[in-house]
Image: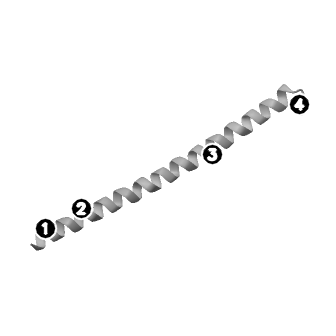
Amino acid sequence: KSLTFFRRGLLFGLTRFFLQSLKSLRLNLAEELVTLLLLLGNLSLLNGLVNSGGGF
């Protein structure tokens, strides 16, 4: 009986760990996506400035 309880606790712990790592992974992915979008936005902004002849 105590063995099944231990196994259930282990399974619960693994599931929680998996979900937590998945959540942090998703957060990291979101942050990287935002960074990438900001980089692309800055590049297109610079491109627009250069193309419009505003130049530096």
Tell me which label, 3 or 4, sits earlier in the chain.
3
Residue at the spot of label 1: 4
Q: CA distance from mark 2 to mark 4?
A: 61 Å
Given this view, does label 4 or label 1 mark the residue nearer the observer? Answer: 1
Q: Residue at x 23, y 65 (%)?
A: 10
Q: Quadrant of the N terminus?
A: bottom left
Tell me which label, 4 or 1, sits earlier in the chain.
1
Q: Quadrant of residue 3?
A: bottom left
Residue at the spot of label 4: 55
Residue at the spot of label 2: 11
- The amino acid at mark 4 is Gly
Q: Residues within 10 Å of mark 3 (few under 14, many from 20)?
A: few
Given this view, does label 2 or label 3 mark the residue nearer the observer? Answer: 2
Residue at the spot of label 3: 35
* Residue 38, numbered label: none
Asked if the residues shown at circle 2 and circle 3 are in contact, with their CB atoms under 8 angstroms apart, the answer is no
Q: Residues within 10 Å of mark 4 (few under 14, many from 20)?
A: few
